[in-house]
Each structure stands twice: as structure tokens, then as C-alpha cells.
Amino acid sequence: GQNIDQPTEMTATEGAIVQINCTYQTSGFNGLFWYQQHAGEAPTFLSYNVLDGLEEKGRFSSFLSRSKGYSYLLLKELQMKDSASYLCAVLDSNYQLIWGAGTKLIIKP
Amino acid sequence: DGGITQSPKYLFRKEGQNVTLSCEQNLNHDAMYWYRQDPGQGLRLIYYSQIVNDFQKGDIAEGYSVSREKKESFPLTVTSAQKNPTAFYLCASSEGLAGAYEQYFGPGTRLTVT
């Protein structure tokens, strides 16, 4: 079966750095997405990785290792507005998106 | 501004009633999707459509129906056959289907059936 694992919840301090991990086992791989979702709102796109390595975009970076079936989202200089759920999703061989359950990130002052 | 709209944001229905959730996009996207989101679970695909007058079942289509008569619109009907309809429903669209296309989401409709 297809499976994506993320921690259910993480807590971090304002101004700090946090890494949210995602491991996956899917039927084929055509890329991995990260989305941010504030409570009760729509998910919004953060990043897409298809090749191994680190992609940096401002305070957010996303890393992929295809051989390990592993990705992480790195958030730097955390702000209170970063409190949200972070969803990992993998595009399988049929170009279907397989979604993880999401990681709820709580930022404390 | 281009985007996706869903209405209403909150919807309450009695058990046994069918209800239709609207989804409209003005992004000129070909592909549209309906997802269901429950606490502690990932997004689950209900139906998707690549072009007008064509749609495919997702992982949890039972108890739901859709239509795609116009490119901009993809309404979802939750029928009385859906055993556990209370959930947060998200509509999304993307430029295409068979590719690494970012999906754009509407604000969602929270449906409560009692």
C-alpha cells in the first residue's frame, strides 16, 4: 500500500528553527509537495521537489532524498503566523497525489 | 483576482437529505478535484475531472456524485447514501492532471449532518 508518515504535532519557539519530517512509500514517485494549512482554511502551496537536494525559498526550505523516501521542511526565524498544519503529499506513478495526515506546528512566544 | 470559490462556508443538513456543494474557478484550469478532510487524516480524493463532461472516481466516491458541465464549475452532491457525511470538503484545481501541477484550493465547506 501507499503510505506517508509525518509527526502529528510539533512545538517550537518564536524565532527558532524547526524541521518537519516526511517519509513515504508509494507506487512510483513523480515529486513531493509541501502545503501549509491554517486552521479552517485552504491549503496553500509551499514547495515542490522532484530531484534530490535542498530547495530554499526565503525562510522555508525543503529537502528530498529519493533513495531514502524522505523529505523535510525547514522553517527558520519562526513567527507566530507560522502556526499551522504542514501537509506532505507525494505524486505517484499515476500522477495521483497521496497526502500525509499533516503536522500541526504550534509556535510559542 | 483569479481563484476558487466554494459556498457556503458552513452547511447544516438533516440526515437523509441530499446536499450540493458548489465550486467555481476562474483560473482557466482544466483539472478539478474534490477532497474530504477529517481530523487526523490526510486529504482523501472523492472525485476528479480532467475536462468538461468527464470525471473519475477517487478513493472514496461512494455516496457522492459530481458533474462537470462547464470548465469553471464542479459541484459535488453528498447523497443520503454517504454514511458519514460530516466533514470539511475542499475543492481544488490545477492546470492539468498528468503532471507535477500545483493544486489551488478553495476555502472549503464544513458540512454538518445531524
Image (cartoon, coloured by chain):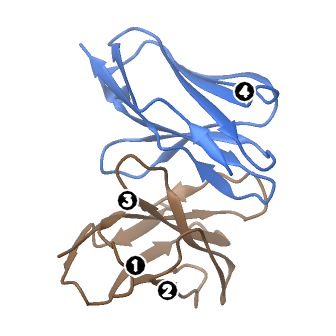
Q: Amino acid at mark 4?
A: Leu
Identify the residue position indicated by label 2 in the image.
Answer: B65
Please give the chain letter of the residue carrying mark 1.
Answer: B
- Which color was chain A given? blue
User: Which sits earlier in the primary sequence, circle 3 or circle 1?
Assistant: 1
Which numbered disc, 2 or 3, marks the residue closer to the eye? Answer: 2
Which residue is located at x 59 percent, y 55 percent? B103
Identify the residue position indicated by label 4 in the image.
Answer: A64
Tell me where residue A94 sits by quadrant.
bottom right
What number is the disc on residue B22?
1
Q: Quadrant of the C terminus of chain A?
A: top left
Q: Are marks 1 and 2 on the same chain?
A: yes
Percent position of residue A67, x then y = 82, 27
Please give the chain letter of the residue carrying mark 4.
Answer: A
Q: Is residue A68 above or below residue A77?
A: below
User: Which sits earlier in the primary sequence, circle 1 or circle 2?
Assistant: 1
Q: Residues within 10 Å of mark 4 (few under 14, many from 20)?
A: many
> Mark 3–mark 1 contact, CB under 8 Å?
no
Tell me where residue A3 sits by quadrant.
top right
Residue A98 as seen in the image, left or right of residue A109: right
Which numbered disc, 3 or 4, marks the residue closer to the eye? Answer: 4
Q: CA distance from mark 3 to mark 1?
A: 11 Å
Q: Amino acid at mark 2?
A: Ser
Which residue is located at x 70 percent, y 59 percent? A96
Percent position of residue B112, x then y = 23, 70
Which numbered disc, 1 or 2, marks the residue closer to the eye? Answer: 2
